[in-house]
Image (cartoon, rainbow, N blue to C red):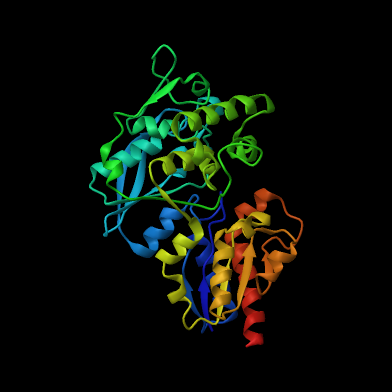
Amino acid sequence: MHWILAPDAFKGCLSAHQVAHAMASGILRADPTAQCTLQPMADGGEGTLAVLRHTLGGHWQRTWADDLSGRQRQVACLLLEDGTALIETARIVGLPLAGGTPLMQRTSRGVGQLMRACLDAGCRRLVLTLGGSGTNEGGAGCLSALGAVWLDAQEQALDGSPASLPLAARVDLTGLDPRLGQVPIEVWCDVDCPLLGEHGATRTFGRQKGAVASDLPQLEAALARVADLLAPDLAVVPGAGAAGGLGFALRFLGAASRPGAAAVADLCRFDQVLAGADWVLTGEGRSDAQTLAGKAPWEVARRARAAGVPVSLLSGGVEALPALSAAFDGTFSLCRGPVTLAYAKANAAALIADTAEQIARLARRSR
Protein backbone atom coordinates (compact mmCIF):
# COMPACT_ATOMS: atom_id res chain seq x y z
CA MET A 1 0.00 0.00 0.00
CA HIS A 2 1.03 3.56 -0.67
CA TRP A 3 0.38 5.82 2.32
CA ILE A 4 0.40 9.63 2.36
CA LEU A 5 1.20 10.81 5.87
CA ALA A 6 0.00 14.40 6.15
CA PRO A 7 -0.39 15.44 9.80
CA ASP A 8 -0.21 18.86 11.35
CA ALA A 9 2.01 19.33 14.40
CA PHE A 10 0.90 18.07 17.79
CA LYS A 11 1.32 21.51 19.34
CA GLY A 12 3.62 21.66 22.34
CA CYS A 13 4.72 18.10 21.72
CA LEU A 14 5.89 17.02 18.24
CA SER A 15 6.46 18.82 14.94
CA ALA A 16 4.44 17.75 11.92
CA HIS A 17 7.54 16.06 10.52
CA GLN A 18 8.08 14.11 13.74
CA VAL A 19 4.44 13.01 13.77
CA ALA A 20 4.70 11.79 10.17
CA HIS A 21 7.84 9.80 11.04
CA ALA A 22 6.07 8.19 14.00
CA MET A 23 3.12 7.27 11.78
CA ALA A 24 5.46 5.72 9.23
CA SER A 25 7.24 3.61 11.83
CA GLY A 26 3.94 2.10 12.98
CA ILE A 27 2.67 1.45 9.46
CA LEU A 28 5.89 -0.31 8.51
CA ARG A 29 5.54 -2.61 11.52
CA ALA A 30 2.17 -3.70 10.16
CA ASP A 31 3.31 -3.85 6.54
CA PRO A 32 7.06 -3.81 5.85
CA THR A 33 6.36 -3.49 2.11
CA ALA A 34 4.30 -0.31 2.50
CA GLN A 35 5.37 2.86 0.72
CA CYS A 36 5.14 5.89 3.01
CA THR A 37 5.25 9.41 1.57
CA LEU A 38 5.78 11.94 4.32
CA GLN A 39 4.00 15.24 3.60
CA PRO A 40 3.79 17.26 6.82
CA MET A 41 1.06 19.91 6.78
CA ALA A 42 0.17 23.17 8.53
CA ASP A 43 -2.55 25.79 8.44
CA GLY A 44 -0.76 29.06 9.11
CA GLY A 45 -0.05 28.58 12.79
CA GLU A 46 3.11 27.62 14.60
CA GLY A 47 5.29 25.29 12.53
CA THR A 48 4.10 26.44 9.11
CA LEU A 49 7.53 27.61 7.95
CA ALA A 50 9.17 24.36 9.04
CA VAL A 51 6.70 22.43 6.88
CA LEU A 52 7.29 24.68 3.87
CA ARG A 53 11.07 24.58 4.31
CA HIS A 54 10.92 20.77 4.34
CA THR A 55 8.85 20.72 1.15
CA LEU A 56 9.99 23.74 -0.85
CA GLY A 57 13.51 24.47 0.28
CA GLY A 58 14.49 28.13 0.30
CA HIS A 59 16.81 29.71 2.81
CA TRP A 60 16.44 31.22 6.24
CA GLN A 61 16.96 34.91 6.88
CA ARG A 62 17.62 35.59 10.54
CA THR A 63 16.61 38.98 11.90
CA TRP A 64 16.49 40.59 15.32
CA ALA A 65 13.04 41.84 16.32
CA ASP A 66 11.02 42.71 19.44
CA ASP A 67 9.00 39.92 20.99
CA LEU A 68 5.89 40.38 23.14
CA SER A 69 7.91 41.44 26.16
CA GLY A 70 9.87 44.00 24.15
CA ARG A 71 13.04 41.93 24.23
CA GLN A 72 15.10 41.52 21.07
CA ARG A 73 14.91 37.99 19.70
CA GLN A 74 16.52 36.48 16.61
CA VAL A 75 13.79 35.20 14.30
CA ALA A 76 14.05 33.26 11.05
CA CYS A 77 11.94 34.14 8.02
CA LEU A 78 11.87 31.86 4.97
CA LEU A 79 12.92 33.29 1.60
CA LEU A 80 11.91 31.29 -1.47
CA GLU A 81 13.65 31.30 -4.83
CA ASP A 82 10.79 33.20 -6.48
CA GLY A 83 11.35 36.19 -4.19
CA THR A 84 8.59 35.36 -1.71
CA ALA A 85 9.34 36.02 1.96
CA LEU A 86 7.32 34.01 4.48
CA ILE A 87 6.87 35.36 8.00
CA GLU A 88 5.40 33.18 10.74
CA THR A 89 4.05 35.71 13.22
CA ALA A 90 3.96 33.12 16.00
CA ARG A 91 7.76 33.07 15.93
CA ILE A 92 7.95 36.65 17.21
CA VAL A 93 4.55 37.46 18.79
CA GLY A 94 3.36 33.93 19.61
CA LEU A 95 1.51 33.58 22.89
CA PRO A 96 4.22 31.39 24.52
CA LEU A 97 6.64 34.34 24.15
CA ALA A 98 4.56 36.64 26.35
CA GLY A 99 6.23 35.60 29.58
CA GLY A 100 4.77 37.78 32.31
CA THR A 101 4.00 40.75 30.05
CA PRO A 102 0.33 41.80 30.43
CA LEU A 103 -1.81 41.75 27.31
CA MET A 104 -2.33 45.51 27.72
CA GLN A 105 1.39 46.08 27.09
CA ARG A 106 1.97 43.66 24.20
CA THR A 107 2.36 44.87 20.63
CA SER A 108 2.96 43.41 17.19
CA ARG A 109 5.96 45.68 16.60
CA GLY A 110 8.22 42.71 15.92
CA VAL A 111 6.07 41.66 12.95
CA GLY A 112 6.60 45.05 11.29
CA GLN A 113 10.33 44.79 11.95
CA LEU A 114 10.41 41.41 10.20
CA MET A 115 8.46 42.81 7.24
CA ARG A 116 10.89 45.68 6.90
CA ALA A 117 13.88 43.30 7.10
CA CYS A 118 12.41 41.17 4.30
CA LEU A 119 11.89 44.27 2.18
CA ASP A 120 15.52 45.23 2.85
CA ALA A 121 16.53 41.76 1.64
CA GLY A 122 14.86 42.48 -1.71
CA CYS A 123 11.79 40.27 -1.42
CA ARG A 124 9.19 40.66 -4.16
CA ARG A 125 6.23 39.28 -2.20
CA LEU A 126 5.35 39.10 1.50
CA VAL A 127 3.32 36.28 3.03
CA LEU A 128 2.41 36.35 6.73
CA THR A 129 0.90 33.44 8.65
CA LEU A 130 -1.26 34.75 11.49
CA GLY A 131 -1.97 31.77 13.74
CA GLY A 132 -1.00 31.66 17.42
CA SER A 133 -0.47 35.34 18.18
CA GLY A 134 -0.50 36.85 21.67
CA THR A 135 -1.51 40.43 20.78
CA ASN A 136 -4.76 42.40 20.72
CA GLU A 137 -3.91 45.88 19.40
CA GLY A 138 -5.18 45.92 15.84
CA GLY A 139 -1.68 45.71 14.38
CA ALA A 140 -0.81 49.18 15.70
CA GLY A 141 2.68 48.07 16.73
CA CYS A 142 3.32 46.47 13.36
CA LEU A 143 2.37 49.71 11.61
CA SER A 144 4.61 51.67 13.98
CA ALA A 145 7.61 49.56 13.00
CA LEU A 146 6.76 50.28 9.35
CA GLY A 147 6.79 54.04 9.88
CA ALA A 148 3.34 55.01 11.22
CA VAL A 149 3.25 57.25 14.32
CA TRP A 150 0.35 57.13 16.79
CA LEU A 151 -0.16 60.52 18.49
CA ASP A 152 -2.25 61.67 21.44
CA ALA A 153 -4.07 65.00 21.69
CA GLN A 154 -0.83 66.71 22.74
CA GLU A 155 0.98 65.30 19.68
CA GLN A 156 3.03 62.96 21.87
CA ALA A 157 3.95 59.62 20.32
CA LEU A 158 2.29 56.49 21.71
CA ASP A 159 3.79 53.01 21.77
CA GLY A 160 0.88 51.28 20.04
CA SER A 161 -0.03 49.10 23.01
CA PRO A 162 -3.66 48.48 23.98
CA ALA A 163 -3.08 50.57 27.11
CA SER A 164 -2.12 53.62 25.04
CA LEU A 165 -4.36 53.38 21.99
CA PRO A 166 -7.59 54.76 23.51
CA LEU A 167 -5.61 58.02 23.90
CA ALA A 168 -4.73 58.19 20.20
CA ALA A 169 -6.02 61.37 18.52
CA ARG A 170 -4.52 60.73 15.10
CA VAL A 171 -2.01 58.59 13.22
CA ASP A 172 0.68 60.07 11.03
CA LEU A 173 1.23 57.84 8.00
CA THR A 174 3.63 60.09 6.11
CA GLY A 175 6.59 57.96 7.18
CA LEU A 176 5.05 54.64 6.18
CA ASP A 177 7.55 52.58 4.18
CA PRO A 178 6.76 53.35 0.50
CA ARG A 179 7.87 49.85 -0.57
CA LEU A 180 4.67 48.47 0.98
CA GLY A 181 2.75 49.80 -1.99
CA GLN A 182 5.07 48.07 -4.44
CA VAL A 183 5.19 44.53 -3.01
CA PRO A 184 2.14 42.23 -2.90
CA ILE A 185 1.18 41.14 0.62
CA GLU A 186 -0.80 38.03 1.49
CA VAL A 187 -2.03 36.80 4.86
CA TRP A 188 -2.85 33.20 5.73
CA CYS A 189 -5.24 32.40 8.55
CA ASP A 190 -8.21 30.22 9.41
CA VAL A 191 -10.02 32.90 11.42
CA ASP A 192 -12.87 34.82 9.82
CA CYS A 193 -13.94 37.01 12.75
CA PRO A 194 -14.31 40.79 12.29
CA LEU A 195 -12.26 43.27 14.29
CA LEU A 196 -14.96 44.42 16.70
CA GLY A 197 -18.11 43.27 18.43
CA GLU A 198 -19.45 40.09 19.95
CA HIS A 199 -17.59 37.88 17.47
CA GLY A 200 -14.56 40.16 17.14
CA ALA A 201 -10.94 39.73 18.20
CA THR A 202 -11.32 40.80 21.83
CA ARG A 203 -14.41 38.81 22.78
CA THR A 204 -13.41 35.72 20.81
CA PHE A 205 -9.73 35.41 21.73
CA GLY A 206 -8.97 37.97 24.46
CA ARG A 207 -9.38 35.58 27.38
CA GLN A 208 -7.23 32.94 25.68
CA LYS A 209 -4.46 35.54 25.56
CA GLY A 210 -4.69 36.40 29.24
CA ALA A 211 -7.34 39.12 29.42
CA VAL A 212 -9.62 39.27 32.45
CA ALA A 213 -13.18 40.56 32.34
CA SER A 214 -12.16 44.07 33.42
CA ASP A 215 -9.68 44.30 30.52
CA LEU A 216 -12.21 43.64 27.77
CA PRO A 217 -13.77 47.13 27.50
CA GLN A 218 -10.36 48.82 27.19
CA LEU A 219 -9.11 46.24 24.70
CA GLU A 220 -12.23 46.75 22.59
CA ALA A 221 -11.80 50.53 22.85
CA ALA A 222 -8.21 50.22 21.64
CA LEU A 223 -9.30 48.28 18.55
CA ALA A 224 -12.16 50.66 17.89
CA ARG A 225 -9.79 53.61 18.01
CA VAL A 226 -7.42 51.95 15.53
CA ALA A 227 -10.32 51.28 13.18
CA ASP A 228 -11.69 54.84 13.48
CA LEU A 229 -8.32 56.39 12.67
CA LEU A 230 -7.42 54.10 9.78
CA ALA A 231 -10.37 52.53 7.94
CA PRO A 232 -13.68 51.92 9.75
CA ASP A 233 -15.09 49.99 6.79
CA LEU A 234 -12.37 47.35 7.05
CA ALA A 235 -13.30 46.50 10.63
CA VAL A 236 -16.20 44.33 9.46
CA VAL A 237 -14.23 42.39 6.85
CA PRO A 238 -13.97 38.66 7.72
CA GLY A 239 -10.49 37.97 9.08
CA ALA A 240 -9.90 41.55 10.28
CA GLY A 241 -9.88 40.19 13.84
CA ALA A 242 -7.22 37.56 13.13
CA ALA A 243 -4.11 37.76 15.35
CA GLY A 244 -5.71 40.33 17.63
CA GLY A 245 -6.51 42.62 14.73
CA LEU A 246 -3.22 42.27 12.91
CA GLY A 247 -5.38 41.02 10.04
CA PHE A 248 -7.04 44.44 10.00
CA ALA A 249 -3.73 46.33 9.82
CA LEU A 250 -2.44 44.14 7.01
CA ARG A 251 -5.69 44.55 5.09
CA PHE A 252 -5.21 48.30 5.51
CA LEU A 253 -1.84 47.87 3.80
CA GLY A 254 -3.60 46.15 0.89
CA ALA A 255 -3.02 42.52 1.82
CA ALA A 256 -5.07 39.76 0.24
CA SER A 257 -6.24 36.90 2.46
CA ARG A 258 -6.24 33.12 2.00
CA PRO A 259 -7.14 30.19 4.27
CA GLY A 260 -3.85 28.96 5.66
CA ALA A 261 -4.41 25.23 5.22
CA ALA A 262 -5.41 25.62 1.58
CA ALA A 263 -2.42 27.87 0.88
CA VAL A 264 0.01 25.37 2.40
CA ALA A 265 -1.60 22.47 0.53
CA ASP A 266 -1.32 24.35 -2.75
CA LEU A 267 2.34 25.24 -2.21
CA CYS A 268 3.10 21.64 -1.27
CA ARG A 269 1.24 20.47 -4.42
CA PHE A 270 -0.78 18.15 -2.26
CA ASP A 271 -3.24 17.26 -5.01
CA GLN A 272 -0.33 15.91 -7.05
CA VAL A 273 1.08 14.07 -4.03
CA LEU A 274 -2.24 12.22 -3.78
CA ALA A 275 -1.84 10.66 -7.23
CA GLY A 276 -1.44 6.90 -6.86
CA ALA A 277 -2.07 6.88 -3.10
CA ASP A 278 -4.02 4.07 -1.46
CA TRP A 279 -4.66 5.77 1.91
CA VAL A 280 -4.07 9.08 3.64
CA LEU A 281 -3.40 9.49 7.35
CA THR A 282 -3.61 12.94 8.92
CA GLY A 283 -3.98 14.33 12.45
CA GLU A 284 -3.27 17.07 14.98
CA GLY A 285 -2.90 17.49 18.72
CA ARG A 286 -6.65 17.71 19.27
CA SER A 287 -9.50 17.46 16.78
CA ASP A 288 -12.76 19.20 17.68
CA ALA A 289 -15.16 21.81 16.28
CA GLN A 290 -12.23 24.07 15.34
CA THR A 291 -10.97 21.36 12.98
CA LEU A 292 -14.17 21.79 10.98
CA ALA A 293 -13.35 25.47 10.42
CA GLY A 294 -10.57 24.70 7.95
CA LYS A 295 -7.70 23.29 10.00
CA ALA A 296 -5.04 21.25 8.20
CA PRO A 297 -6.63 17.78 8.72
CA TRP A 298 -9.94 19.07 7.36
CA GLU A 299 -8.23 20.41 4.24
CA VAL A 300 -6.33 17.14 3.79
CA ALA A 301 -9.58 15.20 4.10
CA ARG A 302 -11.38 17.46 1.65
CA ARG A 303 -8.71 16.97 -1.00
CA ALA A 304 -8.36 13.24 -0.39
CA ARG A 305 -12.13 12.80 -0.74
CA ALA A 306 -12.08 14.75 -4.02
CA ALA A 307 -9.34 12.42 -5.28
CA GLY A 308 -11.22 9.31 -4.18
CA VAL A 309 -8.56 8.30 -1.65
CA PRO A 310 -9.59 6.99 1.81
CA VAL A 311 -8.44 9.26 4.64
CA SER A 312 -8.24 8.58 8.38
CA LEU A 313 -7.62 10.87 11.34
CA LEU A 314 -5.16 10.11 14.13
CA SER A 315 -5.06 12.86 16.76
CA GLY A 316 -4.05 13.21 20.36
CA GLY A 317 -7.68 13.68 21.32
CA VAL A 318 -10.82 13.48 19.19
CA GLU A 319 -14.14 15.05 20.14
CA ALA A 320 -17.16 12.96 19.17
CA LEU A 321 -18.78 15.17 16.53
CA PRO A 322 -20.93 13.72 13.73
CA ALA A 323 -19.53 16.15 11.14
CA LEU A 324 -15.96 15.28 12.14
CA SER A 325 -16.60 11.54 11.92
CA ALA A 326 -18.30 11.94 8.55
CA ALA A 327 -15.23 13.61 7.07
CA PHE A 328 -12.90 10.68 7.69
CA ASP A 329 -12.68 6.94 7.20
CA GLY A 330 -12.25 6.40 10.91
CA THR A 331 -11.13 8.80 13.63
CA PHE A 332 -8.60 7.56 16.17
CA SER A 333 -7.16 8.99 19.38
CA LEU A 334 -3.70 8.00 20.50
CA CYS A 335 -5.03 7.87 24.08
CA ARG A 336 -6.95 4.61 24.18
CA GLY A 337 -7.31 4.58 27.95
CA PRO A 338 -7.15 6.92 30.93
CA VAL A 339 -3.77 8.70 30.84
CA THR A 340 -2.51 12.04 32.04
CA LEU A 341 -1.73 14.79 29.54
CA ALA A 342 1.89 14.72 30.72
CA TYR A 343 2.13 10.99 29.97
CA ALA A 344 0.54 11.42 26.54
CA LYS A 345 2.98 14.17 25.60
CA ALA A 346 6.01 12.32 26.92
CA ASN A 347 5.11 9.17 25.00
CA ALA A 348 3.43 10.75 21.97
CA ALA A 349 5.73 9.30 19.31
CA ALA A 350 5.34 5.74 20.60
CA LEU A 351 1.58 6.12 21.01
CA ILE A 352 1.22 7.51 17.48
CA ALA A 353 3.27 4.62 16.07
CA ASP A 354 1.19 2.04 17.96
CA THR A 355 -2.10 3.53 16.76
CA ALA A 356 -0.87 3.93 13.17
CA GLU A 357 0.13 0.27 13.22
CA GLN A 358 -3.43 -0.76 14.12
CA ILE A 359 -4.91 1.52 11.46
CA ALA A 360 -2.56 0.02 8.88
CA ARG A 361 -3.50 -3.54 9.85
CA LEU A 362 -7.17 -2.68 9.41
CA ALA A 363 -6.61 -0.81 6.15
CA ARG A 364 -4.51 -3.64 4.73
CA ARG A 365 -7.30 -6.14 5.41
CA SER A 366 -9.84 -3.86 3.72
CA ARG A 367 -7.97 -3.72 0.40
The front one of 178 and 66 is 178
Residue 100 visible in image: no
Q: Quadrant of the C terminus?
A: bottom right
Placement of 259 over or under 238, stated as above or below: below
Query: How far from the left and from the top, in percent, is residue 325?
Result: 71, 68
Q: Residue at x 38, y 64 (%)?
A: 55
The reply, left or right, for residue 164 in relation to residue 157 is right
Classify residue 180 by image quadrant. Answer: top left
Query: How far from the left and from the top, in percent, is residue 366?
Result: 66, 86
The reply, left or right, for residue 80 in relation to residue 93 is left
Numbered label tally: 0
The front one of 185 and 109 is 185
Q: Residue at x 65, y 48 (%)?
A: 342
Residue located farthest toward the front when viewing the structure as drawn: 233
The reply, left or right, for residue 194 in relation to residue 159 is right
Q: Quadrant of the N terminus?
A: bottom right
Q: Residue at x 50, y 30 (%)?
A: 228
Residue located farthest toward the top when viewing the structure as drawn: 154
Query: How far from the left and from the top, in percent, is residue 241?
Result: 54, 41
Placement of 161 over or under 40, stated as above or below: above
Query: How far from the left and from the top, in percent, is residue 170?
Result: 42, 22
